[in-house]
């Protein structure tokens, strides 16, 4: 029994001496005037407090993107500009069709008289 107690005490002493120095260390520097800096370190994932689905009325090729994931936006802010060329060509075709229809109307009026 005494041998077990001595053996336990010896192994506890060896473990205690090999476990490393866990003492507090202080760093001292001379007093100086300067800026204060505050750092925050964190691990893990960051989740937003509030998620809002932003919808769109049209779709197409994005010409310019000014918002990124988790960008704080304000009402009326433009986040993406869609390339207007495909839509402009549709408008131009419609204007041309209207001009042709007006010309055909004038032709038909002339034929009627």
Image: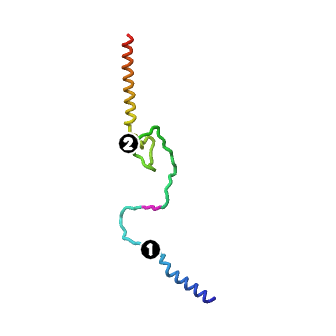
Q: Where is residue 65 in the image (x, y as percent from the top left)?
A: 39, 45
**Residue that label 1 marks:** 25
| Quarter of the picture holding the N terminus | bottom right
Mark 2 / mark 1, whichever is N-terminal: 1
Examine the structure image and report whether residue 41 is included in the region drawn in magenta: yes
Which residue is found at the position 38% from the left and 29% from the top? 93
> Residue 75's quadrant in the figure?
top left
Secondary element type, mark 1 = loop
Residue closer to the observer: 34 or 15: 15
From mark 2 to mark 1, how far is it between C-alphas?
56 Å
Which residue is found at the position 36% from the left and 16% from the top? 107
Which residue is found at the position 51% from the left and 46% from the top? 52
In the picture as drawn, the residue positioned furthest to the top comes out as 113
Q: Is residue 16 left or right of residue 101?
A: right
**Residue that label 2 marks:** 63
Residue closer to the observer: 37 or 11: 11
| Quarter of the picture holding the C terminus | top left
Considering only vertical position in the picture, is 63 above or below 16? above
In the picture as drawn, the residue positioned furthest to the front comes out as 111
Instruction: Tell me if mark 2 has few (under 14), some (14-19) or many (20+) residues whose alpha carbon lies within 10 angstroms of its own.
Output: few
Q: Could you tell me how many numbered marks the image carries?
A: 2
Point out the stretch of residues depicted in magenta: 38-42
Image depth: mark 2 or mark 1 in front: 2
Which secondary structure class fits the magenta region best? Answer: loop
Q: Where is residue 35 in the image (x, y as percent from the top left)?
A: 37, 61
> Residue 83's quadrant in the figure?
top left
Residue closer to the observer: 108 or 29: 108
């Amino acid at each position: 029994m005494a041998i077990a107690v001595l053996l336990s005490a010896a192994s506890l002493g060896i473990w205690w001496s090999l476990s490393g120095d866990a003492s507090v260390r202080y760093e001292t520097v001379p007093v100086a005037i300067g800026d204060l800096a505050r750092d925050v370190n964190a691990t893990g994932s960051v989740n937003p407090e509030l998620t809002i689905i932003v919808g769109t009325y049209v779709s197409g090729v994005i010409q310019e993107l000014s918002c990124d994931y988790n960008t704080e936006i304000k009402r009326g802010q433009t986040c993406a500009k869609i390339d207007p060329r495909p839509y402009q060509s549709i408008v131009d075709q419609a204007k041309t069709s209207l001009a042709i229809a007006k010309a055909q109307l004038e032709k038909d009026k002339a034929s009627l008289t």
